[in-house]
Amino acid sequence: MSKQSNPIEQTSSPTPLLNKVVIVGLGLIGGSLAAALKQRGACNEVIGIARRKETTLTALKMGIVDRASADIADFAGELGAGDVVFIAVPTLTVASVLKDLKAALGRDVVITDGASVKGSVRDDVIKLYGEFPEQVVLGHPIAGSEQSGVEASNPDLYVNHRVILTPMPENSVAAVALVGAMWEQVGAEVLAMDVDDHDLVLGATSHLPHVIAFSLVDTLAHDSHNQNIFRYAAGGFRDFTRIASSDAIMWRDIMLANKKSVLEAIDLFSTNLARLRTAIAEEDATTITGVFTRAKAARDRFTKMLMNQAYVKTMQDNQEKHIVYTVAPGGTVKGNIRVPGDKSISHRSIMLGSLAEGVTKIEGFLEGEDALATLQAFRDMGVVIEGPEHGSVTVNGVGLHGLEKPSGALYMGNSGTSMRLLSGILAGQKFATELTGDVSLSKRPMNRVANPLREMGAVVDTAEQGRPPLLINGGSKLKGIHYDMPMASAQVKSCLLLAGLYAEGETSVTEPAPTRDHTERMLRGFGYDVNREGNTIRVKPGGKLTATNIDIPADISSATFFLVAAAIAPGSDITLTHVGINPTRIGVINILRLMGANITLSNEREVGGEPVADIRLQYAPLKGIQIPEDQVPLAIDEFPALLVAAACAEGTTVLTGAEELRVKETDRIQAMADGLKNLGIQCEPTEDGIVVHGGQLTGGSVESCHDHRIAMSFTIAALRATGPVVVNNCANVSTSFPNFVDLAKEVGINLEVNIVN
């Protein structure tokens, strides 16, 4: 804000949204709203109300109000429908202002406030009016500054900051909309939240930090060495204690108004601080590391959340931004690259490392959102995990029975692997746990693991049709069972084997066709006895997992997109290094070879019990085939990309026995059929597969259905298209392949990424 003698520069609005806005309290919060409304021409007139005459004169001189007074009654007769009164006074003073407003104003004037505590204001309103009137809309702008007073008024204070409205059931829709529109006019993002939830969240995230900052600075100010403390304080100290410069009286009132939530937050913090003090005193490095790594991970997640969405829901735009890939047609792919670590092995390395005794060091960990969801879940259950940093993770195992009850639900994001495998582990714990996921995961079937777990004695509750969230009631005594899987699924098999570690008696699973065996291999790597006889796998309880080191190979599922890209684009020659070639995962190599692809494996070796190799693919014309059903389980995740290869092959490709594809992140059979048709390819989806007639891909727009594999498959399809390919809703690519875009560009795919509304 410039000197008070300079008026606010106005930018006129053709048709002001509001008529009159009266602001009671011309400090930083109220003055900044006045300044912003004036600057943007968002209302016909801004009227200021302040107790001190000097404040009103300063506001008039600064040009942030049109008129000002010490008494709302001076303007009450002018106010009516379309006018808003904003109360910007300390929390405990709001009641007296409301009393004056009730006496002076009619029910057609909308009243809102900016108090940091909503419960006390709600109670004051009900006490005063005898009910909650429809025109009183409670709100809280999340913005501030070290400066205070009308002189600190800043017309940009609310730009890109959040304003939380806490509407009551009695509020009129029009009143809430008018208040929301006022805040949007000054550049704020308007959100809605329940009153009690607001006070609980703000008590922990805003009020507690102020308590700590005020107390810390007060403590150090009484230290005999305080001059040196403050003189040599680093930037972190200055940043953290900045909030101790906030208005002391205002924050006194906030603490008293939100006493219950603030005291709960202080008690929880004090308990955890005492625990950390004990760990430092006893030189308990593992506990200290756990606190610090959990805190860092939580802060990083918080930062990411702030970039997307905070609190509950946005009122101004319920449509999330989405990422669109626009891919130029044609080209070749060439190069020597290494794709990220195998996602399936990354999940299992965290799970078994956490349940092991000792320290497990992991290299090549996939830092995608799915694997990170698994990592965070075990952090939430008390496991100390260091990293990930450039693919390196250190897991301080707690043993099979060392997990702790998490403080809330475990969020699995988009990861079906996390949810299904964790269900088996959690079924054997003594505590109850809830597993939740994003919109996509919440549509996926979970009875395929819930039902056999129930047969073992677990108590598992699901939403309708067996979908998430899952509530796993711990403490049940599990018994081993034999389970014949009706459908080949590595996730179901792994879930039951992991539950079998906690069951009484042997647990055995028979699979109708071979599925990926990473769980069995890794259990053996951790020293746990697993037996296989034909298609039946058996485990018994009573063993233990011993920590080991794991080197995760590159993910063949991620490598598939580049293998298919080279297979369809003439002149291509690409090598993918250190790729896992587990016999239960090489269906994509076998199928591409049957179609005529020129694939060479070299440098074959075994790393941590998993076979790996460098894979080179040089372009050769493809032909359509009848895909052998025994290869389907070995390539179940790779079929979206393989169907692109089929579209570019000469002749017809027939896929059967792949009903599992209909219950992945989306119905991948239908999604691929729809997209291929949009790009000019004739195909017919069937109940358990699809028939694809090879032809010429055209340009066009396709829908990924928020499925990362669909998105990446249609991205590489542009290499053989006659026009640009636009792929919608690609945000979930990061769940499995964080650097896909960079590698695609590196090998020659002309890809542009756009974020749109």
Image (cartoon, rainbow, N blue to C red):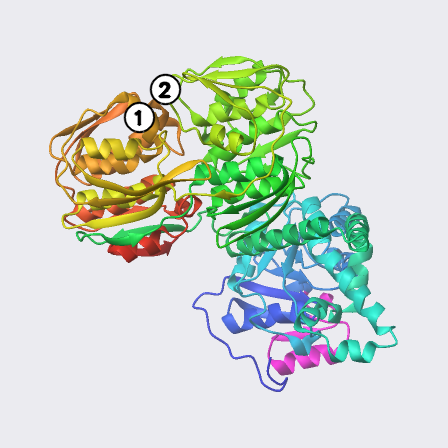
What is the count of numbered marks? 2
Lower position in the chain sequence, tag 2 or tag 1: 2
Q: Quadrant of the N terminus?
A: bottom right
Q: Position of residue 510 (x, y in %)?
A: 44, 16
Pointer 1: residues within 10 angstroms few (<14), some, or many (20+)?
A: many
Q: Would you say residue 73 sits in the magenta stretch?
A: yes
Badges 2 and 1: C-beta atoms under 8 Å apart? yes
Could you say whether the residue bearing mark 1 is in a helix, strand or loop? loop
Q: Nearer the viewer, residue 553 or 1?
A: 553
Indicate whether 77 appears above or below 268. below
Q: Amino acid at mark 2?
A: Ala
x 65%, y 22%: residue:
542
Pointer 2: residues within 10 angstroms few (<14), some, or many (20+)?
A: some
Q: Which residue is mark 2?
A: 513
Q: Looking at the image, can residue 579 be seen?
A: yes
Residue 751 sits in quarter: bottom left
Q: Nearer the viewer, residue 257 or 341?
A: 341
Indicate whether 564 appears above or below 154. above
Q: Position of residue 598 (x, y in %)?
A: 18, 40
Could you say whether the residue bearing mark 2 is in a helix, strand or loop? loop
Q: Position of residue 732 (x, y in %)?
A: 41, 45
Q: Nearer the viewer, residue 479 or 599?
A: 599
Q: Which residues are magenta?
A: 49-75
How far apart in space, not on screen, are marks 2 and 1 (Cα)?
Answer: 9 Å
Q: Looking at the image, can residue 463 be seen?
A: no
Q: Which residue is mark 1?
A: 632
Q: Position of residue 545 (x, y in %)?
A: 60, 32
x 17%, y 36%: residue:
681
x 69%, y 66%: residue:
240
